[in-house]
Image: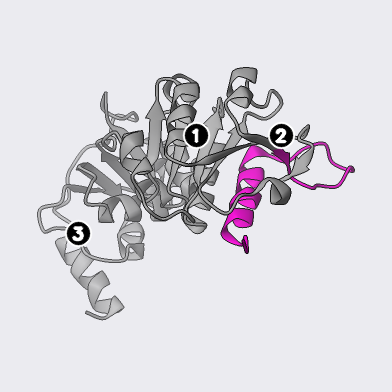
Amino acid sequence: MAKGERKRALRGRAGRMKGGRGSGRATSGHVRLWGRHAVEAALKNPRRSHRKLWATRDGIESLDGELPADFPVEYADVTDLARLVAKDAPHQGLVLECEPLDDIFLDDVLKGDDPARPLVILDQVTDPHNVGAILRSAAAFGAAAVVTQDRHAPPESGVVAKSASGALETVPWVRVVNLARALDEMAEAGFWRIGLTGEGEATLAEAMPAGKVALVLGAEGEGMRHNIEAHCDALARLPISSAIESLNVSNAAAIALYAVATRTS
C-alpha cells in the first residue's frame, strides 16, 4: 500500500468521534506517552497493550501505518491534548495511554550470544531525559540492554519515551533490585565491566577488551557509588579536553557506545 493510501486508510479506520475530554492524568497503573516517534513506536510494538489514543487529525495523518478498525481514538484539539501531558510537552498531536511494558529479566539478556553488543548499566541516573537519551543511543549502537536499579531510576513515562524517540519500545530496559549483584552476574556471563569515571587512569580505548563489555555510568556530579566501582573490572575515562570538567551522562554514554561499536580488536 502506498504511503498516501496508508494515511487515507488510517483516517478512515481511526474510530468514531467521542465526546468529552481526558482527565488530565493517566489512569492509575498506566503510562501516557506523547509525540509522534514515541506513540508510533508504541503502537507498532506487539508487546504493548494499548488503552486509548487522543489525537488531532494532523497527528493521525503523521502516523506511518494503520490502526485496527476498533482502536479507541478520541479526536481532540491541541489545547485539549496539552491538558493530558506534562506542562509544555511537545505532544505533536498524539497522546497514547497504554499498559507499562512487561518486566525484562537480566538472565534473559545475558543469554544473548553476540559479544559485540554491550550492556549499559546506570547507577542512580534519575533524570528521565537522560535515561531516555541513553536508550536512544543504546538503540543506535546496538546495545543489548540498559540496566538500572529499581529504587534509583525514573519510572517508565512519557518523558522517558519522548527523549528515547521510540527506543523505549526496542531496547530492553532491565530493572534489578541489587545493582552490585547484577554486576556479579554479568561477570559470570563473561562481561568485562568498565566503570566510566573522570578519575580513571586508563582511557576507555586502553581498557577496552575484545569480548563482551558492560559500560557502567554514574549520576552526574556524584558519579558511581564506591560499591559499584568495586564491582567493575576496570575504571576508565573519556579523553576529553581539560577545558571542560565532565560530560552529561547521556553524552558520555553515546561516546562510549560508539567506541565499543567501532573497536577493531
Mark sitting earlier along the chain (2/1): 1
| Residue carrying label 3 | 67
- CA–CA distance in space, label 3 to label 2: 46 Å
User: What amino acid type is highlighted by mark number 1?
Assistant: Lys
Residue 27 locus on image (x, y percent): 26, 27
Query: Which residue does the image show at 39% across and 29% down from the upper left?
Result: 175
Mark nearer the N terminus (3 vs 1): 3
Q: Which residues are magenta?
A: 236-265
Question: How far across and how far down the image is residue 12, in percent?
Answer: 16, 66
Residue drawn at x 49%, y 30% as measured from the top left = 183
Helix, strand or loop at label 2? It is loop
Q: Residue at x 34, y 30 (%)?
A: 24
Is 30 located above or below residue 160 in the figure?
A: above
Callout 3 amino acid: Leu
Between 120 and 184, the residue placed more toward the observer is 184
Q: Which mark is residue 87?
A: 1
